[in-house]
Structure formats: C-alpha cells, structure tokens
Amino acid sequence: MKNDNKPKPVNIPIEKLHPFEGHPYKVLDNDEMNMLITSIQEHGIMTPLIVRPLENTDEYEVISGHRRIHAAEKAGISEVPALIYALDRNTAVIAVVDSNLHREHTLPSEKAFAYKMKMEALNQQGNRTDLTLSQVATKSDTAAEIGKQQNESRDQVFRYIRLTNLIPELLQYVDDGKIALTPAVELSYLTTAEQTALLETIESEQCTPSLSQAQQMKKLSGEGQLAMDTIFGILTAEKPNQKEQIKFKVDDLRKLFPKDYTTQQIEKTIMRLILVRQQKRERNKNDRDPR
C-alpha cells in the first residue's frame, strides 16, 4: 500500500477495533494460532495492523491483522499497534483481499468470497459489468485481472465465485476436501431446497457426488425435476471407482518371486496360477457330479 505520507503506528485499544464487514477469511484456533499467541506473548506484535476509521466514531475497522488481533486477545493484550488509513469501502475491500490471498493455505470458501468481494469492488470503482459467467472477456475484464494476480485463469476465478451459491454445509464439505471444486461448481446451480435435500442424503448415506452425478443433478434441477427421491437414486448409484477391489502391495508380492522378476512377470504369473486353480476346481466339480 503506497502512501507518501505513511502514518506512524499508534496503539489502539482492542475494544475500539472491529472485524472488516464481510471479511472472507477464517480466523481459526489451530496450531498456527497457538504459535502466533506464543510469539506475541514473548515479543509483542512486530507488524502493526492496518485499519481505517469508522465514520463519526473514534473506532476503527480492521483491514489487515484479524489473526494478530485475535492472538493478542488470547495473549491478554489490551492495545495493539496499528497504521490508520482513511480508505473508502471499495479500496478497503481490495486491500483486505490482497493482504490475505498470498497466504500459503487458503480455503476454497475463502477464495470464493474474496474473489467475489474484490470483483464487486473493482466493478464499482470502474463501472464494469463483467460479473457473469457468460460475459465475453474484454480489455477491462475484472475476472482476468484478479486471476492474473493469483496465477489462475479467468474461468477459475468464476468457478470459485460460483461456490458462494452453495449452502454453508456443502461449502464446508468443499473446504474439507470431501467434494472437489468442479462437482461443487455444478452443485452451486441447485436451489437452496435441492441443496438441503442433497445434504440430507450425503449425511444419511455417507457418500458425496461425483462430477457426473453433480452434472446430472444440475441438468434435472434446470428442468425442475430434481426431487428428493431422485437425488437419493443418483447419489446411491454405484460409481465405477466404488466397485469392490482387491489390492496388493508390490513390495509384499516381490518377496514371493525371484528378485529379477518384473512387475509384469509377477502379474502374469499370478493370473496363470489363478487360472490353473480355477481349472482344477472345475475338474474336481465334474468328478464329483458326473453326468
């Protein structure tokens, strides 16, 4: 954030600081947070927060530093250093998003709402209208601009934004890695009632939709034919990768064969032994039951 008259840090009481409205990033009490709490207890806050003044008050909205302020509260600190910038809402939104997207671990839901917030802010700043999936790319394409900064395609930016149409419970499945991004995008076209019915089926049957199943549900939803029993039928249909399989570790099998055997030789030998055993069983069966 460039500013020729960069403000100096000032200490602000924590009770006068408020989370940014619509802040898309989660503040979690995890191992990283515990490390940050310990660091603040030992060294204090090394990097000041960035805040903006709230109109007609002596309080502030946090732009950058939500994790630091949470850790400071946990550490029992009552004041934190901050840099105060008088930013309008749209400029502040862009600063909030950009100050967090560089993080190593960003959840799909965080990207989804961050991209949406930034796109809307840029749109309002420049009066752009490229906010739909069907919009043809233009020289002032906001999605392409956002994607370039994050090394992602324009289409990928729109895929993430589609996730904001998911109900929170399904979005959590995406964050947990239980539903992949591409099927989740398809599911985002379902109505809230349909998504709720899908969630009930996922929880009762302990299974999640594949891409083809999600595409099938999207199509039926568009035709107004996606009922609860239809969702159940689609979701409980056996997927190719769910068919029962028998697996062996190669290292375990190698112990049973000569050292110079290749994987292909081992496989052929196993199949030949199985075939011989099957033929022997058939002969024994015929001997016991002659006709």
Image: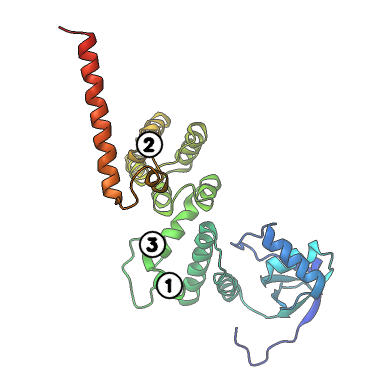
Query: Which quadrant, please, contains the C terminus?
Result: top left
Secondary-structure class at tag 1: loop
Type of the residue with mark 3: Thr
Q: In the rendered structure, are the residues bearing label 3 and label 1 in contact, judged by CB atoms less than 8 Å apart? A: no
Q: Nearer the viewer, residue 245 or 50?
A: 245
* Left-right relation of 37 to 168: right
In the picture of the structure, the residue carrying the numbered disc 3 is 132
Mark 3 vs mark 2: give the one in front: 2
Q: Residue at x 48, y 68 (%)?
A: 119
Q: Position of residue 51 (x, y in %)?
A: 70, 75
Report the disc number at residue 260: none
For residue 119, above or below residue 271: below
Q: Earlier in the sequence, mark 3 or mark 2?
A: 3
Residue shown at 51% from the left, 31% from the top: 204
User: In this orientation, which residue lies closer to the viewer: 45 or 81?
Assistant: 45
User: What SS does tag 3 mark?
Assistant: loop
Mark 1 lies on residue: 151
Position of 282 with respect to 47 (left or right) is left
Residue type at mark 1: give it. Answer: Asn
Measured as percent of width and height from the top left, residue 211 is found at 36, 47
Residues packed near mark 3 inside 10 Å, few (<14), some (14 to 19) or many (20 plus): few
Instruction: Residue 92: name its quadrant.
Output: bottom right
Q: Residue at x 76, y 83 (%)?
A: 9
